[in-house]
Amino acid sequence: MIRDEAGPLREQLVQLLAEDTHNTERLTARLDALAQETGLSVHAGLLLLLTQLPFEETEAREHWEGILAQRHAMSLALGRDVGLRVATLDYFMNVNRRLVHPTLIDLALHPTASAGGDVLTGLPRDRAFRAAVQGELRRARRYGHAVAVALFDLDAFAALNERVTPLVADRLLREAAMLLGNKIRDIDLAARPGEDELAILLPETDRNGAFLVAERFRREVESHFARRDAAGAPAALTVSGGVAAYPEDAADAEALLARAAQAL
């Protein structure tokens, strides 16, 4: 029964998870509204997508409340939002102990896996990043939020690649991607849209906020690679960046990314 109902719900649940996973109250309200609209087992369908575990709706609702409580406790302990997927995994492995061999998370819900993530950095590539920007803009229009993007070019990366060999250059690029990941929130999304390009999607962030994030990353890269030895000399890798924000700079995803590219 639950598996049969998950099919019709799948597209709506995937979109809901993509848009609202960082806002617990709104996500819960939208789940309840969807349950009333469809009459289907919404919470059971959600957990089936996330864990591959079938539940009746009443039990699924109890687990959902437990997952939210676990997310809150973990976020307080770590000082940051751990996100829905991490909380779900921890709940079923360490609290409820139902996941012996976890299959979290359904690949269709993960932008990197579903769109062919970058093998080198593990980040989503251009197609997945653009889809994420479009999804976030839909949410922003619905709730009246700002959205910002920042694009980065690795300066003179082709010349660096020749100087230190492609193997070392790949390692430096991977380090730059890690530095970027360390500078963003759980609700943000880092990506590698091009060979020597990195990007971030910043929900609920205006242009000034995006500039501050981009500038911190630029400084971190400059400082890190000034000390990083590569082929007997400092790697001296730097980045250039450009930011743009909705709604002041553009009203749709392609225009927003184009404005950030122009700023870069």
Image (spheres, rainbow, N blue to C red):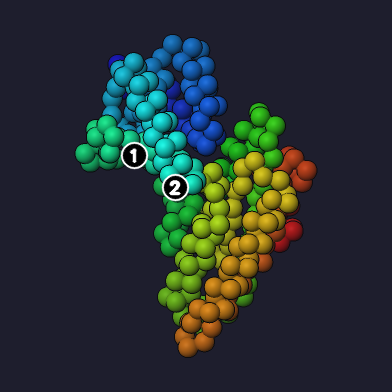
Residue lying at 39% horizontally and 35% vertically, measured from the top left = 70
For marks 2 and 1, give the one nearer the viewer: 2
Q: What residue would you read off at disc 1?
A: 89
Q: Closest to the observer: 257 or 76?
A: 76
Q: Quadrant of the N terminus?
A: top left
Q: Quadrant of the C terminus?
A: bottom right
Residue lying at 58% horizontally and 67% vertically, measured from the top left = 220
Q: Amino acid at mark 2?
A: Leu
Residue 16, given in percent of the width and then of the height, sits at 51, 29
Q: Closest to the observer: 27 or 7?
A: 27
Q: Is residue 54 above or below residue 74?
A: above
Q: Residue furthest left?
A: 100
Q: Is residue 256 above or below residue 175?
A: above
Q: Residue furthest bottom?
A: 232
Residue 139, given in percent of the width and then of the height, sits at 62, 33
Tell me, yes or no, if residue 5 can be seen here.
no
Q: Earlier in the sequence, mark 2 or mark 1?
A: 2
Q: What residue would you read off at disc 2?
A: 78
Residue lying at 62% horizontally and 75% vertically, measured from the top left = 156
Q: Amino acid at mark 1?
A: Leu
Helix, strand or loop at mark 2: helix
Tell me, yes or no, if residue 41 can be seen here.
yes
Q: Closest to the observer: 245 or 167?
A: 245
Residue lying at 39% horizontally and 38% vertically, measured from the top left = 87
Helix, strand or loop at mark 1: helix
Q: Residue 101 sits in which quadrant?
A: top left
Q: Is residue 194 above or below residue 228?
A: above
Disc 2 from disc 1: Cα separation? 16 Å
